[in-house]
Image (cartoon, rainbow, N blue to C red):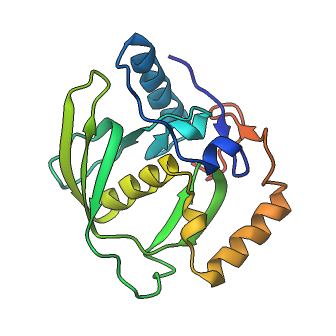
Amino acid sequence: MTVLPVTIWGEPVLHRRASEVDVFDDELRALIADMFETNDAANGVGLAAPQIGVGKRIFIYKYANDDDVPEQGVVVNPVLTLSKVSGALPDPDEDVEGCLSFPGEYYPLQRAEWTRVQGFDGNGNPVDFEATGWFARILQHEFDHLDGKLYVNRLVDKYAKKALKQAKRNGWGVPGLTWMPGVDPDPFGH
């Protein structure tokens, strides 16, 4: 297993829809193992393949939850069904997200409180489960990566402007930027 560099906002693979996985083989399973290793080194709760420069519809998660779902898993070619997202403004204390591809920053975002996830594991076996609360938020966040969206693309204007200013200050928004979990300083201070 290998820790891979995490792409930063501006890398083209992060901003386009990822391709369906059509072959479930040892190469796919090695990629998934590398994703878990990278996520662990980054102290993440989830990682999507585009975040390591791979434009495939795969995400992994690692989060202790109350939904009777294993704490760690992978979903290949996921489909999400969501409850309605509240139209209320996000709570700046309770609804804050961060992203390994927008490292070190946090912004409030409203998400659905419930989601159903369907897809496949790394062997091509069906996966189907429901998630609530923060776990549901994580899964929606990772799924968005597969459609070429980062959470900052969903922010209300007030926070979107702050995020764009921060990206500009950091020199992001151009191809080729990455950070290396376990080597570079942890951008979230874990």
Query: Height in image: 153 above or below 143?
Result: below
Residue 86, picture quadrant: bottom left
- Residue 117 in the figure: left or right of residue 150: left
In the displayed orientation, state which residue is furthest to the top: 26
Name the residue nearer the viewer: 109 or 187: 109
- Residue 126: give x, y in percent of width and height: 19, 33
In the displayed orientation, state which residue is furthest to the bottom: 88
Name the residue nearer the viewer: 152 or 43: 152
- Residue 85: give x, y in percent of width and height: 35, 76
The residue depicted at 59 percent of the width and 66 percent of the height is 153
Residue 130, picture quadrant: bottom left
In the displayed orientation, state which residue is furthest to the left: 68
The residue depicted at 25 percent of the width and 70 percent of the height is 83
Query: Height in image: 77 above or below 110?
Result: above
- Residue 96: give x, y in percent of width and height: 50, 70
The residue depicted at 54 percent of the width and 33 percent of the height is 41
Query: Height in image: 27 above or below 13?
Result: above
The residue depicted at 69 percent of the width and 44 percent of the height is 12
Marker count (numbered): 0
- Residue 45: give x, y in percent of width and height: 43, 47
Query: Height in image: 95 above or below 99?
Result: below
- Residue 89 in the figure: left or right of residue 165: left
